[in-house]
Amino acid sequence: MSGDAPRPSTDEHRRFQGSGAALAGLLFAVLFSAGFFMLDRQPDRTAGADELLAYYRGPAGQVLLVAGVYVVPLAGLCFLWFVAAARQRLSLMARREDALLATVQLTAGVLFVAMIFVSAAASVTGVVSVRVGGVDDAAVVSQLRTMTTYGEALLMIYAFRTAAVFIVVSTTRAWKARLFPRWFAVVGYVAALLLLVSLTYARVVVLVVPLWVVGTSVIILFRRVHGDLEVA
């Protein structure tokens, strides 16, 4: 007679993994979108050095600080969990594992998170210097404004192009594993193409990645609820 507690079945364990990927993806989408639009509330570029210092010390500076220190880092961690759980799900569903695509998917996902971390850090360099570092020289704070431009460029040019690679590879793996329907695979490729060729700083482009992640998460949850996540 064994005193061991009953273990969950393999199917239950796999379904839980599917839920983890979906929930992490949804959390990422919410936190990333909120964090970006919070960080986008930067001082006007025509503001003088003293205005800039006052801005960072005020309530608006507090919003920037919260976004850079808490919201964006949490979004990045959720995305890493989404990547890990989604890769596990695809590996279980795939008829034949493609090691190259799996490696590129992981690399692109990790690199995307690293870039959004650096971008967020650059965007809050000024406010952190004032509110945490104790910098009170308006001229110094004004010079730190260039870090915000650097953060924007890193996010809009490099991070989103890396995200495009992640979307292409993930879509290809998910389509081969029959996780994605054909129409959503097409949506994924179009979204990736937009991120690759876009040369604009239009804020709407920022929503492409979280919206794709939301779509992926909903599909995973739908498949889990209907009990067909294991269909290959």
Image: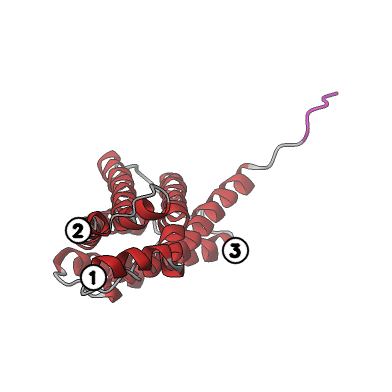
Which of labels 1 and 3 is toward the front? Answer: 1
Whole-percent x, y for residue 212 in the image: 37, 66
**What x and y, as percent, mark residue 60?**
42, 69
The residue tagged with tag 1: helix, strand or loop?
A: loop
The magenta-colored residue range is: 1-5
Tell me the distance, in whole angstroms, between the alpha carbons under discs 1 and 2. Answer: 14 Å
Residue topped by disc 2: 146
Residue 147 visible in the current orientation: yes
Write down the quadrant of residue 3 in the picture: top right
What residue type is disc 3 on?
Val
Does the segment drawn in magenta span residue 144? no
**Amino acid type at image mark 2:** Thr
Q: Residue at x 28, y 74 (%)?
A: 203
Separation (CA) of disc 3 from disc 2: 48 Å
Identify the secondary structure beneath mark 3: helix
Determine whether, in the image, residue 4 is placed left or right of residue 46.
right
Disc 1 vs disc 2: Cβ atoms closer than 8 Å? no
The residue drawn where x is 44% and y is 56% is 75
Mark 1, mark 2: which one is toward the viewer? 1
- First in sequence: mark 3 vs mark 2: 2
Q: Residue at x 31, y 53 (%)?
A: 125
Q: Nearer the viewer, residue 204 or 125?
A: 125
Q: Circle 1 is placed at which residue position?
A: 48
Q: Residue at x 49, y 67 (%)?
A: 218
Residue picked out by circle 3: 225
